[in-house]
Amino acid sequence: MPKRLLMISFDAVADRDIPLLMTLPNFSRLCRRGTLVREVESVFVTNTYPTHTTIQTGVYPCSHKIMDNTKHIPGASGEAWNFLAKEIRVPSLVSESLRAGKKICSVLYPVTGGAPIRWHFPEIAGDLPTLTRAMRTIRYGRPGYVILSLLRFGKYIRNVTPESLDRFTAGIAARTIARHKPELTMVHLLDADGTKHVYGPDTKEAEAAIRHLDDRLGELLDAVDRTGNAGEYSILVFSDHACLSVHTTIEPGKDLLEAGISPADASCHDAGGSCFFRIDAKPDTDAGRRVAHFLTDFARRPEIEREITSDEMRSSGASELFSTGFIAKEGFSFGEVFLGQHGYSTDRPGYHTFYLAVGEGVPADQVIPGGRLIDICPLAIDLLGLPAWRTDGHNAIM
């Protein structure tokens, strides 16, 4: 019997959202059919692109080389997102499924841009004009599929909200599943992430977003049923990171400039709950001493919880570009102003996520505490029947 896998990302849904999800019809029904892994430790930096790349590859960011959502370009005013699949330096579910001759559908799944996926609508993130975004989506996706998807489901995104974007995404993916039965389908749903950023994680708006996610899950499960081959499908529902409330945002890059430090001497990369400093000034120069003095004072600020450890710098891949970094205290973040944020260290209490698996060989109605994000990919490899490759995790369910 062919093996098919549907992977659904609930971006920014935390383990503490599970009690609500368990009251909802589609998620709770799926839990009775499979194994729910709770209190899952993400990977640092706990932002969307490095975490989703870890889910694709089963290795830490230091190996796959997607350290954060965006690249660090000292002195630049714009953003350069890490969206291209060719920047992943290790085998991935996409590359190895293609190698095995499997047909893939990917709708807004991060870091797939430019991959030769049969049904491909890539995520092109950032603050872009509509026409620019559309042209990049066509360029880095499957042009015919992108254009037809926009024609069929564009009504959902005339007024773009996180909920309408997910309706658009689920509509595209559900139609593709029902008509073409891809062996691997990867879907990225953003309602909880976008809503928690704007309103905060502990709000009625965030609760509504999670309810909407259950509706989208139902649409995708209905599409599997419409194939007439539901027994061939395994399902993986997961999240990449949690989200914490923020009341104050600071901008270390501006602080550097106000201290008279040039971007040529030192620069800061903001990653939400963490920030990283690149130091180019030589330590025995006046500029180097100004930078050292700035960092000493910065580490003492009340917004700072601690310096990032050498192990965190290494595992995240940050040590390849940055000299040091810092974690924000609860309620604080770095960079763009939001009421909810991620990017914090994985040791933050209550800062966990989840994954849920259904499929052949997966125990039904089981809950396992204390999982790891790096274990999702090895599980997906087994569910798809792919030849294994070296990963940092292992299949903790089957």
Image (cartoon, rainbow, N blue to C red):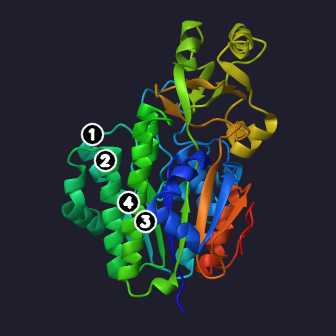
Residue beneath label 2, please? Answer: 133
Is label 3 in a helix, a strand or a loop?
strand
Residue beneath label 4, please? Answer: 215
Would residue 163 appear left or right of 357 to someone viewing this image? left
Is label 1 in a helix, a strand or a loop?
loop
Would residue 92 appear left or right of 203 to someone viewing this image? right
Q: Nearer the viewer, mark 3 or mark 1?
A: 3
Q: Which mark is residue 345?
A: none
Furthest residue to the bottom?
1
Sequence-first tag of 3 and 1: 3
Sequence-first tag of 4 and 3: 3
Position in image of residue 153 (x %, y %): 23, 61
The quadrant the N terminus occupies is bottom right
Sequence-first tag of 2 and 3: 3
Would residue 41 appear left or right of 201 to someone viewing this image? right
Residue beneath label 3, please? Answer: 106
Position in image of residue 93 (x %, y %): 58, 68
Sequence-first tag of 4 and 2: 2
Q: Are marks 4 and 3 in contact (CB under 8 Å)?
A: no
Kindly report the distance in space between the C-alpha atoms of the residues bearing marks 2 and 3.
17 Å
Kindly report the distance in space between the C-alpha atoms of the residues bearing marks 4 and 3.
19 Å
Residue drawn at (51%, 47%) of the image: 82
Is label 2 in a helix, a strand or a loop?
helix
Which one is nearer the viewer's eye here, 350 or 87? 350
As shown in the figure, which amino acid type bears the numbered disc 1? Pro
Kindly report the distance in space between the C-alpha atoms of the residues bearing marks 1 and 4.
30 Å
Which one is nearer the viewer's eye here, 144 or 35? 35
Position in image of residue 241 (x %, y %): 59, 46
- Structural crowding at the residue carrying mark 3, measured as other residues with C-alpha within 10 Å and reported as few (<14), some (14–19) or many (≥20): many
Q: Are marks 1 and 4 in contact (CB under 8 Å)?
A: no
